[in-house]
Image (cartoon, rainbow, N blue to C red):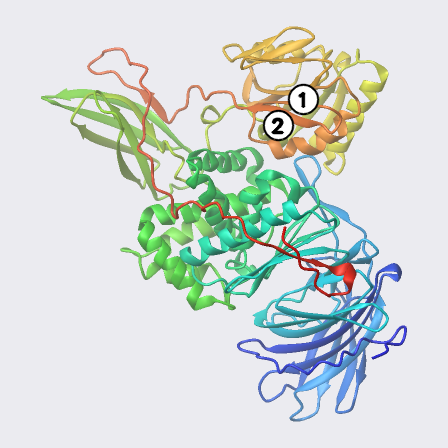
Amino acid sequence: MRIKAGSLLLIAWPLWLPALGSAELHHALVVSVDPDQHGIEVQDTINTVGDGAAGVEFALHPELTPELVGEGARLAELGRASSSDTGLATRRFRVELATGQQQFTLRYRGRIMHALRRQGEEYARAFRETPGMIAPEGVFLSAGSFWYPRVADQLLTFDLEIRLPKGWSGMSQGERSAGEADDGSRRERWRCDAPQEEIYLIAGRFTEYREAGDPVEALVLLREPDPALAKQYLDATRSYVELYNGLIGPYPYNKFALVENFWETGYGMPSFTLLGPKVIRFPFILHSSYPHEILHNWWGNGVYVDYASGNWAEGLTSYLADHLIKEQRGQAVEYRRTALQKYTDYVRTEQDFPLTAFRSRHSASSEAVGYGKTLMLFHMLRRQLGDQHFVEALRSFYRQYRFRVADFDALEAVFSRVAPQPLDGFFAQWVQRQGAPALRVSEADVKAKGERHVLTVLIEQTQPGPAYSLQVPVAVQLEGQSDAWQTGVRLEQKQTRIELELTARPLRLEVDPEFDVFRRLHRAEIPPSVSQAMGAERVLIVLPSQARPDLQDAYRRLAESWQAGNGEQVGIVLDAELEVLPADRAVWAFGWRNRFRYQVNEALQGYAFADRGDSVRIEGATLERDNQAVVVMARQASNPEQALGWLAADKPAALPGLGRKLPHYGRYSYLAFRGEAPDNVLKGKWPVVGSPMSVQLGADGAPAEQAPLRLAPRPPLAPPVVEPSPVSVTRVDVSLGGRLAVGRR
């Protein structure tokens, strides 16, 4: 059929009847987009569930004006309201329906074009987002775009017919069929019978790769052809869907697609993920962020979140994706320590909040609470219940709430069914209470008792406020034994004295040695790190007055970019303007010729660091001034609570990239970069010295011995993903208007 310019796309396909399930609305949308003009034209037939409703209220984008098509309904505009999630001043409408009427049809057109804007804290971590965009680079429309009539707090199903320019293709939830119009434009139809929270419309010029599977089809949509990259993602899709099918339950959709976005994102939508062009080409993404986004189809996009009572899905997804993969590689202890370190470094008292208040990540501090504290909640729950009961509860939770909204109360109810004791106190403490415990070993004494030894330990909770109820692991390395003896102790008071009767002489005691308890770490438990400076309440950046002009200007631009949007948090000063460094805030000393550089060298006495003027030596690696940019972290000698960082480069062009990348290396103590990008060539952490959770023990007045702690390994919650065998891939070249170009790759 011939489509007139500017008209709605009306495709002569048979109408699909909606399978509403538990959804309350069904949308039958016919959409045409004009990327060059940022334009959209829509006809939407909305079907209400049941016997009909007296009326439907909805919000729409401010540049879209709807009109009713047909008889039997009345449309009235109610005014404008600011959207809480995007800030758009949306237009609000109400449709009054005649008695017994179940559906109505709206038609509207207009422009949607919102530039990318930066969200979050520029200094610690920032994100670029848009409420919606129809542009030559691509189309990004979500519920936050208000591109379709958005009814609050109602699940929906939909049919979506899309007309796109020649050479373009789209992505949404559900199943797709596609074809080509007479004028060469592409037309697609998407059908989603599973109840959804919103409708996505993504489009662009893509080369498509796919691999059929039972029951899940894997898709990769790239902005430039790259069969090797596509093959990696298709294989990873199959492997991780298989992993989570076995761990949790059947994948809730019939496809999963990797879609390359036209700006850097890490979005997980139902049945697809939208990742940025640089992100998808980082090799570590395949086994970190990518399985995280796949798993969101169970948690967040399969079982929905009641955001009003707290977002549990990000933490559970992080635990069963990021943490599980580290656990499979024997790196879970370090992962948990890093999560606790982020909380310790980024979350000050005034930034903290209970999990009931977490909606989404918008800063480093909100990420540390919403992701880190929640994943640790699930880890502690697993440790309390045991792996078998924990997995049983996960599967039950998924079965019961698939395509339904669930909150922390629902989690508590499901997990309580497999728990040997009530969990109401556990969830109240970790979900509703703000903050975290802080622990230390205050006393440890060993006495011989015949052939046995009695170890007496005083453990304190040092946080302000009341005590937490904690189950804390304790490990003791015994003389003559390979693996440490381990037990758990219950802490209910601010001070708890325990006695352990042991079969051999204890050499070393560690409390919570594998970071199994969510808590605020003592500074001596973690090495000096970038995150300590990035998370500081106040920061002073000291610029080198003796640097050459082009380099000094580049340092100042970097400092000002960190200062932007942070008010009085970040100050900037020349080194010549200071007599001494302030001890009441974190300090960054910029430049090889900074007059306070020597203080970093002094603060790192005892570590594998040597300052040699135009080079430094770190852990055996020599870093030259003219070849590398260097970042080194220490603590101020007069106040270890405050970080002292040194950042130096000899190429001004390397500093903007270094400033953008540095927040992503928060857990490291030292870094080196090469080139103007710049590219990381060295990263590491200083050793931990003097932890208050670790005690070297002596018996009956004997001197303490330096004894290492050896812990038996724990099995992961699920076995590692097996590397997939080579398979054939079908490539779909969308420049052919939807006709398949099949070839072996």
**For the residues bearing labels 1 and 2, Cβ distance under 8 angstroms:** yes
Q: Amino acid at mark 2?
A: Ala
Label 1 sits on residue? 588
Rendering quarter of residue 732: bottom right
Which numbered dot is residue 533?
2
The residue positioned 57% from the left and 48% from the top of the image is 290
Left or right: 57 with respect to 416?
right
Query: Farthest left residue?
Result: 450
Please provide percent x and percent y for residue 363: 64, 43
Q: Is residue 88 visible?
A: no
The residue positioned 56% from the left and 27% from the top of the image is 668
Left or right: 732 with respect to 66?
left
Q: Amino acid at mark 1?
A: Trp
Looking at the image, residue 709 lies above or below residue 266: above
Rendering quarter of residue 439: top left
Looking at the image, residue 366 lies above or below residue 450: below
Tag 2 secondary structure: helix
Please provide percent x and percent y for residue 455: 22, 25
Tag 1 secondary structure: strand
Please provide percent x and percent y for residue 677: 74, 29
Nearer-the-camera pick, 288 or 569: 288
Are there few (<14), some (14-19), or many (20+) residues within 10 Å of tag 1? many
